[in-house]
Image (cartoon, rainbow, N blue to C red):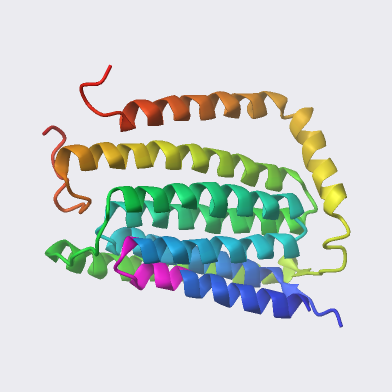
Amino acid sequence: MQIAIFILFAVLALAGALNLLFQRHPINSALSLVVVMLSLAVLYWSLGAEFLAAAQVIVYSGAVMVLFVFVIMLLNAGEEEQTHGSKAAYLVGIPGALGVFGLLTYVFLTENHWIGGVHLSNAGVGASQNLVAISELLFTKLLLPFEVTSVLILVAILGAVVLARKEGQS
Amino acid sequence: MSTTVPLAAYLILAALLFSIGIGAFLIKRNIISIFMSIELMLNAVNLTFVAFAHKWQAVSGQIFVFFVMVVAAAEAAVGLAIIIAIYRSRKTLATDDINLMNH
């Protein structure tokens, strides 16, 4: 059960990420990023993080991606053209990305003996416990960082309004 | 039937998504696509956080992911506003044409 869920949604996430890489039109990339984020939400759920799975669907694939699609359509972004900069990026980008992947995989596999496995045994049952544990920590020990993020969001809203305003308007 | 998935599989998936994000960040020429590949990398790192939070049964990893989500949402709002401002003054989204600080 666990392994079927993992394989299905890992393949879906990888297909979405590769589609993001190979699509030329930004709107196709944005929609494949939504697929990646939704499959990651299912993987969070399978790891026992029910609250984060819900937050992933609402915040990322809901709010952030709607913002992306909105901007793509507002600016009428077309297909990107290949330039000579692309060739240099291919020469550096593909070996660099492969190098990072190889390094991370090597570390994860050599440390595999103590990392262990994942059971789905209490996923779904522990949803309320997960929420209780997160909120208890968030509203007692981490209350100050939590309140500071609200200030951060306020600053971000003001910054976005000021930056996106048309020039010449007061 | 309850088969276990090795946690390393989750971590390798996250590494793969992160590397695809790096590749897309370097190869893409459209500024919105570059921004989306940054979001992909943030998501890949979040997956490792959740996987290790599961491993040690610690909620603090999940709270870290929560804060990353908040910061990413704020970053997306400001970044897209900057992209709109750039498009207003340059009429282009190609990063090769956006190479001057003043205009």
Expressed as whole percent of the image width and height from the top left, the position of residue A12 reads: 56, 74
Expressed as whole percent of the image width and height from the top left, the position of residue A130 reads: 82, 49
Majority secondary structure of the magenta segment? helix
Hey, which quadrant is residue A118 in on the image?
A: bottom right
Q: Nearer the viewer, residue A87 or A34?
A: A34
Q: Nearer the viewer, residue A75 or B64?
A: A75
Residue drawn at 40 percent across, 55 percent down: B36
Specify start and end residues of the magenta stretch as a single range.
A17-26
Q: In this view, which residue lies farthest toward the top? A: A170
Residue drawn at 28 percent across, 16 percent down: A170
Residue drawn at 54 percent across, 59 percent down: B44
Q: Is residue A125 left or right of residue B85?
A: right
The C terminus of chain B lies in quadrant: top left
Expressed as whole percent of the image width and height from the top left, the position of residue B97 reads: 14, 50
Hey, which quadrant is residue A116 in on the image?
A: bottom right
Q: Is residue A162 left or right of residue B86?
A: right
